[in-house]
Image: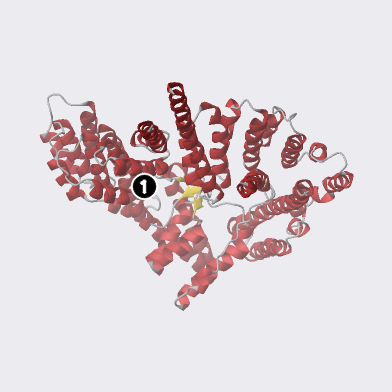
Amino acid sequence: MIRWIKFFCLILLLDVSGSSQGLFSYENSLQFADYLFESGQFSLASEEYERVVFLNPHDSASIGRLLESYRMQNRSELGLKRAGQLIGDRDDLPVKLFSQIYYLEMENKRFEEAEQLVKLQSNLDDTQKNLAHLGLAISQNKWNDARSYYLNHQMAEESPYYTSLGNIIQEYSSKRKKSPLLAATLSTIIPGAGKAYTGRWADGAIALVFIGSNAWQSYRGFEKDGIKSVRGWVFGAIGFGFWVGNIYGSYQTARQHNQSVMQKYHDKASDIIYYAF
Amino acid sequence: MTRLRILYITLFSLFALWANGQSVDSLIAYADEQFTAGQFNLAAKEYQRALFFGPSESVGALTVKTGDCFLEQKMFSEAEKYYHFASNIIQDDSLRFEALSKKSVCLIHQHSYQQAILDLFNVNTEFSARATNQKEFLLGTCFFGMGDFKEAETHFHLALEEGEIAKKETIKTLLQSKKLMKPDPQTAYWMSIIIPGSGQIYSGDFKSGINSAALYFGFMALLLNMTFTSGWVDAIFTVAPWWQRYYTGGYTNAKKIAFAKREANRANIYRQIFHLINER
Amino acid sequence: MRKVKTIGIVISFISFATFLGAQDRSYLSSLENTFTPQMHEHHYSHYVKDAKNPLDFIFGALYLSYKTFISSQDMESCVFHPSCSTYAIESIQKKGYILGVINAFDRLTRCHPFAGPNYPYDEKSQRLYDPVD
């Protein structure tokens, strides 16, 4: 009889432990975390992956997704911190996990660490290594470095990612930049011309109209009442303000134009790098 | 003796099954508790876990609960998605009504009255008089939002019990009150076109009316002054654009002010109706 | 035994009551103020209050009186967020009096209906987004 009672107790114990673990077991949590991640609920997913990773610290795929969910929430700083705590040894990581740490390092502007990380990997093939190097150069806006690196590392059988990244780099390098000084000079001579040069035709036209009409008003004032004309001075001052403003604005617009062209290519390149791994 | 042993084993196995079901239930109970405590994101996550692992019969109810987590946070378009999904899979009338009426609340908050009306007309509330009342109240709210006060009155009346005659009378007077239509934006607009500032004063914004009139007449004086001193060409090029600008600004503003005041009046009347119907 | 039963009944009653409460409570009550128009309170006076010197005070006062008496009477004519006047005073604070004013003059010539494609759109203010950088 005692034997039977022991047997029942064992069964009971197994069942109960099974059921209480059930929902929160490693496998189920992982499944649920993947569901949250794939349905785009990254904040909930990161909480769940934290537990998954706690239950199985060797699950590198989940660590990768945990880091990615932090990144998707724009919490790269926390992501990088967790990467430091969860991953002791940074060499020879699985490619997926490597890429997440690489992105986090770049988003935290820790370019040297990222470069170090790339050097430690032996799981990356040549294309991936080259892509990682180009990505680093571009995120630091070192376009010339990127270009010469690409030209020195062209490969016989390139992946489409690598080719299109190379194309983007070369396209940007051949793009004509606008000179801020030329824009300012043009606007000094003909109001609004500098703006037109940077591609902002409407801004230039409005500036020309504003400056022209104020100058004309001022001229009429002075013509009528001489040097004491209030109207002459008021419109003159406003017109002068618009003129100086336009010169300064043309200089700034040229700079911003170059900046935004670079940003456009930077974004295009980032899209490729973020897909490549 | 052997039979008894078999019986014991069967019983314990059944207990184990029950315990497993129990763990989803306790998960839901935990989520409910988090919901009550105001931890809506946590609750939403646990409801979804229960959805993910629980039996298929509970999917509808759990989807509604997940929606509730978003509704509580006033994330109406997010909540609406969950209620919409739930209403498509729920068979039970009472639960389906809950999903659809919550969905229509989300729609009303987003000013999509037509869509809410369509949903409400398609929901069956025969199972309880209370649900019917609630549906009619929501319909009344939709028509009120659309400015159809006659239709709103019909539905608000249906939202009340047969015997609540006094309340019905009050609602009738409230919905026929002139305040619902006053101040009239179009009137304010034309008043300010004819006499700058008057439309704003009519709408109850005395300060803005005076301000507008001062700008208008100020620029007019400047315009006349310049016409006499420097000639009409200069006057038209330098002052007329400003004069015109604040004239146009004035009557456009008058219309806006009247509209906002009328909205506030309507909101006030709706609030009274809301309390009449929902406080019993 | 009876005690246990009583406690059980009490507990189930309480939980049922909270269940009903939770059901009824929130989702209709949120409708009470659904038609109340959202009023945006504007505060333009802090540039005057926070002025550190007379020149700051003058610019702050100019801004305050423009916003209160003139801009309020205008149509919604500025295409940008922040508006030209706010941009001007922020520009003066960030770039100093001379460069700030010059920059503000440039902003006025950029503010026109054809500015669209060159600026990001700000959903909240429904304007083109162009802050002082």
Q: Does dot 1 land on a helix, a strand or a loop?
A: loop
Q: Does residue C79 lie above or below A39 as drawn?
A: below
Q: Residue B66: horizontal and vertical position, in percent?
A: 53, 39
Chain letter behind tag 1: A
Query: Outermost residue, top direction?
Result: B3
Q: In which quarter of the image is residue A135?
A: top left
Q: Mark 1 points at which residue?
A: A74
Q: Residues within 10 Å of mark 1 (few under 14, many from 20)?
A: few
Q: Is residue A25 left or right of residue B213?
A: left
Q: Residue at x 36, y 56 (%)?
A: A247
A16 or A106, which is in the foreground?
A16
Q: Does residue A10 lie above or below A106 as drawn?
A: above
Q: Residue B97: horizontal and vertical position, in percent?
A: 67, 32
Query: Outermost residue, left direction?
Result: A152
Q: Residue C50: horizontal and vertical position, in percent?
A: 48, 73
Amino acid type, callout 1: Asn
Q: Is residue A261 left or right of residue B191?
A: left
Q: Residue at x 88, y 41 (%)?
A: B163
